[in-house]
Image (cartoon, grey):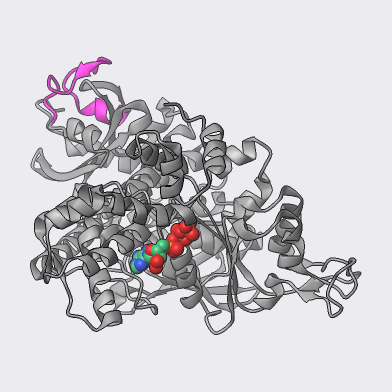
Amino acid sequence: MFNNGIVNYENYNNVEKNLKNVLNLANTSQNAKAVEEEIYYNTAKNVGRSLNVTDYNSLSEKIMELGIGQIVITNMSDEKVVFRLYDCFTCSDMENIGKPVCYFEAGILAGAVSTISKQDMDAVEVRCNALGDSYCEFDVTKASGTKKSFNDDSDGEKTDINMLYLTINSLKLAKSKNQIQSQSQRSTQDNKKLNDALENALEADNFNQNIIDSIPNYLAVIDSSGMVVRINKKYQEFLSSAFKKDTSIISLAWESKYLEVLATGAPAIWQQQISGKEHIIFESPILEAKAVLRQVIPVESDFIKLLLDKISVLEEQIDSKKKAGETEHATLHDPKVMVASAEMIDLVNYIKKVAKTDASILMRGESGTGKTMFAEVVHQESPRSHQPFIYIDCTTIPKNFFETELFGYTPGAFTGANKKGKIGKLEMAQGGTVFLDEIAEIPIEIQSKLLRFLQEKKFEKMGAVTTQQVDTRVIAATSQNLEAMIGAGLFRKDLYYRLNVINIVLPPLRERSQEIPGLAERILLQISQETGAAVKKIEAAGLQELMNYSWPGNIRELENLIKRLTFLVDDPVISRAAIEKELNTAESLNVFAGVAKNEIKENEKDLIVRVLQNCRDNKSAAAAKLGITRQTLYNKIKKYNITF
Ligand SMILES: Nc1ncnc2c1ncn2[C@@H]1O[C@H](COP(=O)(O)OP(=O)(O)OP(=O)(O)O)[C@@H](O)[C@H]1O
């Protein structure tokens, strides 16, 4: 037993012993490490089963979604499936240690293939980064019956699944924490995803006390005032006296970073010696509940040692990059694409991975954040890159023309139709990619036809009696709130789910202001390459000014502003004063208006309000600056319920 926050490691061993007993493995001839690997393997196998994947495509997507890596099947028969796993979650950063270590991944694949093939399968890892290979390879074959699993025990299975999900989520959080240079640079999008994942894992079981009790880590929930409002059995066992709900962490003498975690929304992870043994303390936010989930994980198992090794490798990498003062770039085929923050590098690496699949993609983000540019990146990075990429701006197609634009028509399909008929854009892009920009504009009647195309790759031209099949990948983009449109009956839910197989959210520039210096530098370089003039620089205080600005027009607006400044400023260095002036003057509003004219989208209301304020509510002046008619401005004021 312990006090002053000192954890007695013996109890963790007891928990582990119990687990081993459940598995009936403790008395076998296998050594302790093998037993532990077996536990993780079997636990992961049950998770693999519970993924309920029905085919290898969905398995591939699921593996990617869980952040485990990217699988490729290299051999498949009734007896055996061989998987290669790239970017393996466990071992991708490891050096050769002479033995395979990915029993986690092996278990997940074994479980998932068991579900798909409807027979019990086991996986053996034959290649691994930890064996000196550059990827992992798993042979998944019919189970011999020697390995144990929890299949017959549904409660056990559920418990394992929760344990594994929590562990995976913890690892992901720990990993991402260490991959990012500072908390301030941390992507809100990532934070949200990770937080959601954790919350889902918890909420799925209503944070049931039985479940937290079954987790062999010490677990507690701390509320925003520092009260420990929940604690699991394992943790309780370490306290010198019985735990009473709502005890403050100070009185328990726990070192906690709950205040920092709640303030930043980012998890805190550190290592601490407790009772002479190393432990990982991991505190992550449960934002909805304004609470912090604290886990104490003994650093005794090989599993945690592997994690720590990985963390230190990542830390070293980050340090050396910082020292070198480099900005890491994800290499892309298109040199125009600028990626200048850790967050965007992660996103680009993800885009490169999903590009290799055929799944539909939904790009989301405000106008000017790069949806079109990154849709092209997906195409260029995909095996379809030598086939057409066709851009369709759905805002420019009249309602009645959507069907013929997308699907085409046969000769004489309607009065006035072209005698030769018309090939639709989906057919034109055969073998390639169609990018549907502002998909929310597609009328609901056409949405069902598009849905069928996404499901079956089949459609009928207008007026046709035969069905056609074409192999075209669809990428869609929207700056609209599709969920609200579904609620209003304007967008089909099934189409939304179908498109949303892969969801890429491009954050607005104001949320990635640390990218601005890098972006500005590259824009200046690009201008110099285009004009042949010397590359200009921006004064440091000027960059700060750019970083503080809210960029309603995002990167497009930044590009326009910098282009304008390079023409206006003769000096080789663009000063803060020039930037300030440009951001504030009527000219900058005109640039802004140039942006606005093309971008009457989600941030339109904000834009109109700002321009109206700048024009002191003079609607004629505001309409002129926005590049729209007075009547259109009135319509929009009414539409958005703008009051003065
Ligand atoms: N990462 C980037 N690197 C370089 N240029 C970029 C980047 N992201 C966006 N841009 C540039 O910003 C401008 C706007 O990008 P893009 O047209 O792709 O945005 P969008 O989200 O599709 O906008 P809209 O919704 O208005 O169609 C383009 O000129 C594009 O080249």
Quadrant of the picture in which ligand 1 is shown: bottom left
**Where, quadrant-wise, is the C terminus in this rendering?**
top left
* Percent position of residue 188, x then y: 32, 46
Between 550 and 148, the residue placed more toward the observer is 550
* Percent position of residue 541, x then y: 10, 54
Q: Measuring 33% from the left and 50% from the top, which residue is drawn there?
A: 589
- Asked where in the image residue 242 lies, by quadrant, the reply is top left
Which secondary structure class fits the magenta region best? Answer: loop
Query: Image check: 95 left or right of 455?
Result: left
Query: Image check: 301 left or right of 55?
Result: left
Q: Is residue 146 visible?
A: no
Q: Which region of the structure is painted magenta?
A: 233-254
In reply to whether residue 119 is colored magenta, the answer given is no
Q: Is residue 398 above or below residue 152?
A: below
Query: Image check: 367 left or right of 268?
Result: right
- Asked where in the image residue 484 lies, by quadrant, the reply is top right
Q: Is residue 142 visible?
A: yes
**Where, quadrant-wise, is the N terminus in this rendering?**
top left
Between 43 and 321, the residue placed more toward the observer is 321
* Percent position of residue 627, x then y: 47, 52
In reply to whether residue 237 is colored magenta, the answer given is yes
Between 66 and 502, the residue placed more toward the observer is 502
Q: Measuring 14% from the left and 22% from the top, which residue is drawn there?
A: 252
* Percent position of residue 97, x then y: 23, 73
